[in-house]
Image (tube, rainbow, N blue to C red):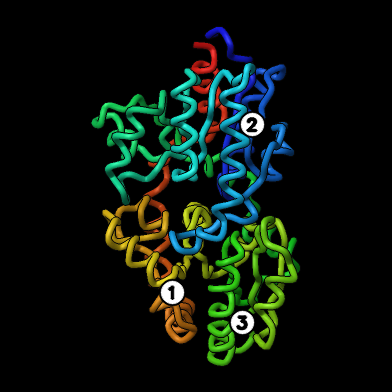
Amino acid sequence: MTAGRSQAIMLVAGEASGDLHGASLCRALRSLDPRRRLFGMGGAGMAAAGMDLLVDVTANAVVGGSEAVGQVPRLYRAYRQLRAALRGAARPAALVLIDFPEFNLLLARTARHVGVPVVYFIPPQVWAWRGGRVRTIRRLVSLVLAVFPFEAALYRRAGVPVEFVGHPLLDQIGSAPTREEARRRLRIDERALVVGLLPGSRHQEIVGVLPVMRDAAARVLAAVPGTRFVLGLAPTVERPLAEQQLVAGPDVQIVENQTHAVIRAADLVLATSGTVTLETALLGTPMVVCYRLSALSEIVLRLLARVPWMSLANLALGHAAVPELHRRTTTSERLARETLHLLTDASAREAQRAAFGELTGTLGEPGVGARAARLVLAQASL
């Protein structure tokens, strides 16, 4: 252990998905080394897993460039607080960054400057966009914990120390209910035709996408009477906000903190692009993916993107198995049309399930949290 460093480990996550993966890592770290203090930035999940929460921005996370402008003061305050902890007399033994690259790479600079090892868990998707960041990562990061096998190969070729640990979702979906159990839990008849709505974990996604889902649901219900709609509400979203977006639409059952049950109970899922698309694929439920960015953010993203897809499901598969609707095509009419196509065409649904089967084994094996924790502790002991 280098003089001036404590035994503590700082972990930093800025979004709901990062908090989910960070919680799994925190539990594994506490299991392996119960006396070691964990602290940093995250959400309720990481706090419940034993991390001392200095700051939480997960409920205010946004997507895109122009959308993030309003969050800059809050993020800057969080950055200054974490930077001060890194520079303090009892700076941590290691810094673990979880996704959230624009913010986290700034912190990595400070950690590098004061001699704190940096481990990046859920690293930037340099294979998808902004590939030039790999040079920054090579300079600042001590070890990348890759969650996709192909990104491990990419980082290795770029000269970045990397270990493939597998995707943390593999640990989390192991406890997902079966379809029958999920329907019993949600009080849904086995014969019902069910469409799951997963509008995202951010305020802007709920406001931007859920009204489109609501109007698409009305069109689907008119075409297929009796269809049931179940919305999986993320823990970072307040129920009244979702209810407000559903006014004047068809009846929608809102379910809190049961995303896997919603996915398993559904015949089809309408999902906002994000981690949940990979969860849905791993759980084998067909889906339509949609997302909405500002016009400026969409232009920037398409200029910088190195692959033609947005959803993790398609990115992980390497081909377009799942229909994706972006800002201009995310209309209720288009979404309803894609939904009805999958609901009425069994072969289309089966084609998606077959594609999802390709993911089996390619993302690693369960035990991701424990593998990652051992590597983090090794860096903290250098």
Q: Which residue is mark 1?
A: 346
**Number of other residues with Cα within 10 Å of mark 1, as a class: few under 14, some 14 to 19, many 20 or more:** few
Q: Secondary structure at mark 2?
A: helix
Q: Secondary structure at mark 3?
A: loop
Q: In the picture shown, does residue 224 fall above or below 105?
A: below
Earlier in the chain: of badge 2 and badge 3, it is: 2
Residue 103 numbered tag = none
Q: Amino acid at mark 1?
A: Ala
Residue 227 numbered tag = 3
**Number of other residues with Cα within 10 Å of mark 3, as a class: few under 14, some 14 to 19, many 20 or more:** some
Q: In the picture shown, does residue 221 fall above or below 86?
A: below
Measured in 3D between alpha carbons, the distance from the residue under mark 1 to the one under mark 2, in whole angstroms, is: 42 Å
Residue 26 numbered tag = 2
Earlier in the chain: of badge 1 and badge 2, it is: 2
Front residue of 52/357: it is 52
Tally the marks.
3
**Number of other residues with Cα within 10 Å of mark 2, as a class: few under 14, some 14 to 19, many 20 or more:** many
Q: Residue at x 35, y 53 (%)?
A: 315
Earlier in the chain: of badge 1 and badge 3, it is: 3
Q: Nearer the viewer, mark 2 or mark 3?
A: 2
Measured in 3D between alpha carbons, the distance from the residue under mark 1 to the one under mark 3, in whole angstroms, is: 16 Å
Q: Position of residue 246 (x, y in %)?
A: 66, 80
Q: Quadrant of residue 334?
A: bottom left
Q: Residue at x 35, y 37 (%)?
A: 149
In the rendered structure, are the residues bearing label 1 and label 2 in contact, judged by CB atoms less than 8 Å apart? Answer: no
Q: Residue at x 33, y 34 (%)?
A: 136
Q: Is residue 141 visible?
A: yes
Q: Quadrant of the N terminus?
A: top right
Q: Nearer the viewer, mark 1 or mark 2?
A: 2
Q: Amino acid at mark 2?
A: Cys
Q: Position of residue 96 (x, y in %)?
A: 53, 30
Measured in 3D between alpha carbons, the distance from the residue under mark 2 to the one under mark 3, in whole angstroms, is: 40 Å
